[in-house]
Image (cartoon, rainbow, N blue to C red):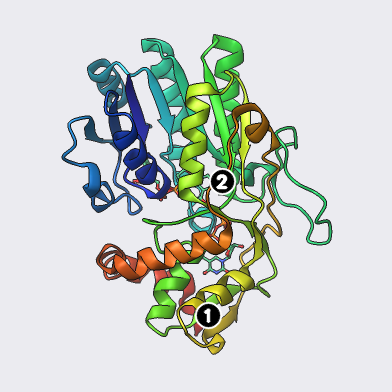
Amino acid sequence: MNIIVTGGAGFIGGNFVHRMVKKYPEDTIINVDLLTYAGNLETCKPVENEPNYKFYRGDIADADFVNRVFEAEKPDIVVNFAAESHVDRSITDPGIFVHSNVLGTVTLLDACRRYGIKRYHQVSTDEVYGDLPLDRPDLFFTETTPLHTSSPYSSSKASADLFVLAYHRTFGLPVTISRCSNNYGPYHFPEKLIPLMISRALADEELPVYGDGANVRDWLHVSDHCAAIDLIIHNGRVGEVYNVGGHNERTNLEVVKTILHALNKPESLIRFVKDRPGHDRRYAIDPTKLETELGWKPEYNFDTGIAQTIEWYLNNREWWEHIISGEYQNYFENMYGERLS
Ligand code: NAD
Ligand code: TYD
């Protein structure tokens, strides 16, 4: 089969490409990525010389480009990871989220209709459900929880999901959607909480915790997310949404302290800073449907996963030191300069 993976030079898409190229040598994995600030060909290095791997650089919202790729590659499956993915950036610049996340998705769906496809899979997020209160630990997001978004990022992802479902209902396109909780693991761009804190703690720099650090995220190791998508594209039911999460809820403060302890750094590096506007309080996924229908089970819990991740950042300094030495410096100054001054 020919499988187009968009966003395969990013964090989760990159991990997925590694998995698919190695696991399915008889399939061709076609990575389509614009290489925005978050895309990095260094992430594709482990597979770049494999005979069943190809790369195209371009914008998924550019219909001419997308049609050229579809004509050349005749994909059987399309897995769409490509997106602007950072909530803080969506607060500063929402327009690009509409372009890549909404228009990009619709452009891919149109190409799938035109050329025919066995499966279109949309990689979505639990953030489309909004947030849960901190004092109701009994509540979880299920696939029937109403969409109730908070940020421009989550609104763009929810819009994309609605288009995907509309193309199924209206045009009969064979689609599936996965909505996963927060990922962490190798090749995670150091603007997100966990890699940001690891890289800064290693440099003995202050760790900016938003608000009081009591917000809760449900953390899943990226390889468990990739395994779930692999199962869904092969065995999932068309037209269905599957939640992905491993019941690993932690407050942000707990996460930051775990990282500090693992690196033998003092808690005095923690700096409470001005909160993110509209900051979601708690995310928590109920993955029962994925577990019972498709037999998915995560390999990592948070303790084993964070240990593996910290180890990876210690052993792959070149990958992230290169990133934080460039344009990232300006990003950090704009996003945190005032908060940390
Ligand atoms: P990322 O920001 O690390 O990578 C995104 C990739 O998409 C980059 O390689 C970038 O170059 C590419 N891209 C962006 N716009 C593009 C465009 N217009 N055309 C082609 N390529 C483009 O993101 P990530 O964290 O790997 O997330 C991947 C997907 O998973 C996203 O759709 C995100 O919404 C979803 N998701 C992420 C998480 C998480 O915790 N990171 C959790 C659930 C779902
Ligand atoms: P993030 O990694 O941006 O993921 P998301 O907002 O999609 O959940 O943030 C995870 C949590 O960490 C979120 O509650 C915001 C918080 N956070 C900080 O406290 N400080 C930071 O510097 C960052 C980037 C995030």
Residue at the image position 51 percent from the left and 14 percent from the top? 173
Q: Which residue is mark 2?
A: 298
Q: CA distance from mark 1 to mark 2?
A: 25 Å
Figure quadrant of the N terminus: top left
Camera-nearest residue between 271 and 3:
3
Q: Does residue 63 appear in the picture of this structure?
A: no
- The tag on residue 312 is none
Q: Is residue 56 above or below residue 126?
A: above
Q: Position of residue 239 (x, y in %)?
A: 60, 19
| Label 2 secondary element | loop
Q: Position of residue 277 (x, y in %)?
A: 64, 63
Residue at the image position 35 percent from the left and 45 percent from the top? 14
Quick check: 44 left or right of 19?
left
Quick check: 149 left or right of 109?
right
Q: Nearer the viewer, mark 1 or mark 2?
A: 2
Quick check: 329 left or right of 48?
right
Q: Is residue 340 above or below residue 110?
A: below
User: Three-letter amino acid code at disc 2?
Assistant: Pro
User: Three-letter amino acid code at disc 1?
Assistant: His
**Label 2 C-beta lies within 8 Å of the nearest ligand 1 atom:** no
Residue at the image position 68 percent from the left and 46 percent from the top? 285
Q: Position of residue 34 (x, y in %)?
A: 30, 41
Q: Which residue is mark 1?
A: 261
> Which tag, 1 or 2, sits closer to the chain's start?
1
Question: Which quarter of the picture shows residue 250?
Answer: bottom right
Q: Position of residue 27 (x, y in %)?
A: 29, 24
